[in-house]
Image: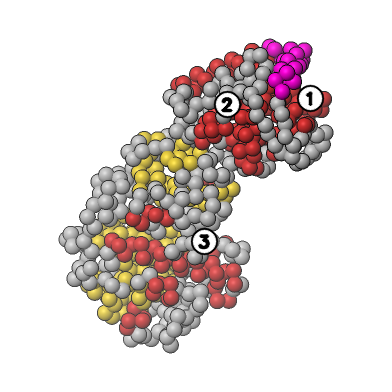
Amino acid sequence: MPAMLIAKARLIWGLVAAAVTLVLVVTGALVILIGGLASTEQSNQDQAESGCIGGTNAIPTGGGVGVDGEEAEGSVSGFTTEQVQNARTIVAVGKQAGVPAYGWVIALATAMQESTLRNINYGDRDSVGLFQQRPISGWGSIADIMNPVKSAQAFYGVAAHTGNTGLLDIAGWRKMQVTAAAQAVQRSAFPLAYAQHEDEARALVAALADGVSAADLTATATDVSCTIGMAGISTSVVRPIQAGLALDNNNYGNGGSNWANMHTGNDYSSPCGTPVQAAHGGTIVIESGGGWGWSGRWLVKVQTAPGNLTTWYGHMQSLSVSPGQRVKAGQVIGQVGSEGNSTGCHLHFEVHPHGGGYLQDQVDPAAWLKKNIGKTLEATKQVAGLPGVGPRAGQPAAAPAAVSGPQVRIAQANIKVSLSRSRYRSDLARVLKHGPDFVSLNEAQSRSVSDISVRGYGSYRASADEYGARSQALSPVVMWRTDRWVAVDKGVVQLTKPVTGVKNDSRYATWVVLASSDGSGRISVISTHAMTSPAKSPQARRDEAQRGFAKLAGLAQGLQKYGPVLVAGDLNSPYPRSGGDGDPWGPKPLMTKAGMTSSFETLGAPPQGWATHDGGGTIDWLLGSRATAAATRHATFRLESDHHGLVADYKIRGQ
């Protein structure tokens, strides 16, 4: 836009203000203005009820243009005469309707984005005018919309010619960010675009109106100590950022230099300062310092109860809550920022259904939100949290003792999904004949709970209600002897997702933390079944397999802080019998980096030979945490399945 200096003459502005007032009366707007004032009064009442009225961050509603129509001295550069005249009209209409000054900022930023403050007779489809309103959408006739006064009245929600939702109809708009409030009225395909005009709009209001400073406007716009739409707070699951105000990066599970193992949450890009709201009700836990630095000065958790659903909110630039505070779904807890390990303004959002820690029970937040938005989720169990978490949320207790000294036995068996129930149970009996402390089963997605239930053993796998019948999440199962072990925590982590159209590429790991019944300590067992035949697939699928193994390694590494870890499963990548790392996308280098060692690496070939599959491949693996679990012997045994069983003894070392 051509730059020019606008000297604001008191007399000229008085005439403009008078002219605008005359137009308002002539067009029959006076009655609507009374309604607008009533709306503002109701807005003030809502604000008072929410405890947010007044204070250093409040915009004085009595400021703006004086009663005599005079304007403060000052100047604005960068706008044409037409643009300034349109801006003055928008401000005057807002003032006359009793709209607080912050509303003028929102209106100007909207018009800047929609029309560059020009009253144009064209636009997208049938959009015209300052705010690019559409006749077909009920904003009035073309003549109405092309009238700057009427179009501004429509935006504010005080127009006689349209009943469309305007700014004053939006509950809690005075506590929304500019871009959020503008989008609530405009419903644009580009909801974040208004943010780029905030500073310019504030400066323009400050220059065109008495008694309102840019600092005041900025303070109100960034004050999120109150909730958005207090009266409308939901008890059901909601998005952590209001719909339309953030872009979903869909990067859950990604790998790369930004993350030590994997990206355990999902990022939602939004301008810094955008309100972040609790996705569900619960108690606030705030983590800071130590290993939480990746999130910035703090990481906020909303916890339904210890060991239950907990969501994480990272990189926020400011908080509106304190530890131990109870919040409802939709209540503002802070502002989007770019704190810590961040490359731009965004919210890092994680979902932990069982209240687990880093790399333990997180699920894809986007999928979780899609499934649960609108549902009321309460704590479903009262159980101990993860090992090392004290009785009060967020208060670390002494680390639990690791299992020290005994020898444990673990068996791995991929029992073919197509076997009949009787043949399946026969193979399972062959596995249990070896008396293992722990069993890892694969391909159990078609098996009922009774199929995998055996007296003397506990078992855990994903819930069919949560993931769906026959989902690959149900494939890996962990079993344990109940006379020696008690499960104290458990979870499921998705490792891979389809990238080339192969539906079965959604693969998972099931993990269980077990305490010995004699009180000697704890051990973690992970069962997994990796995607089939990546070696014969496009590079994208091999890359996804590698990301899956990185997540598996991260899970194993994360659980080691609580004691020894054993991993078992059909990894669908042959162990490199002749040395080296094997498949470049495969598990060995990643698991080694995570402190995990295969029994094959420690002991060589089992006495029965290398094969763990009828095809001759060594694709079923057993691994132990190198520092705390040493394989002492292993063997394979035949099953009716196309896989052989694999069993190993591990000597548990003290930490």
Which residues fall within the magenta stretch?
9-31
Residue reaching furthest to the left:
518
**At 40% across and 84% down in the image, what residue appears?**
610
Query: Sequence order check: which comes first, mark 2 or mark 3?
Result: 2
Name the disc covering residue 254, or none. Answer: 3
Q: Is residue 266 visible?
A: yes
* Image vertical order of residue 236 relative to residue 93, above or below: below
- Circle 1/circle 2 CB separation < 8 Å: no
> Which residue lies under the disc numbered 1?
147
Name the disc covering residue 212, or none. Answer: 2
In the rendered structure, does residue 28 fall within the stretch colored magenta?
yes
Q: Secondary structure beneath disc 1? A: loop
Q: Secondary structure beneath disc 3? A: loop
Where does residue 507 sit, x and y in percent of width and height? 49, 63
The amino acid beneath tag 2 is Val
**Predominant SS along the magenta part:** helix
- Which quadrant of the view contains residue 283? top left
- Which quadrant of the view contains residue 630? bottom left
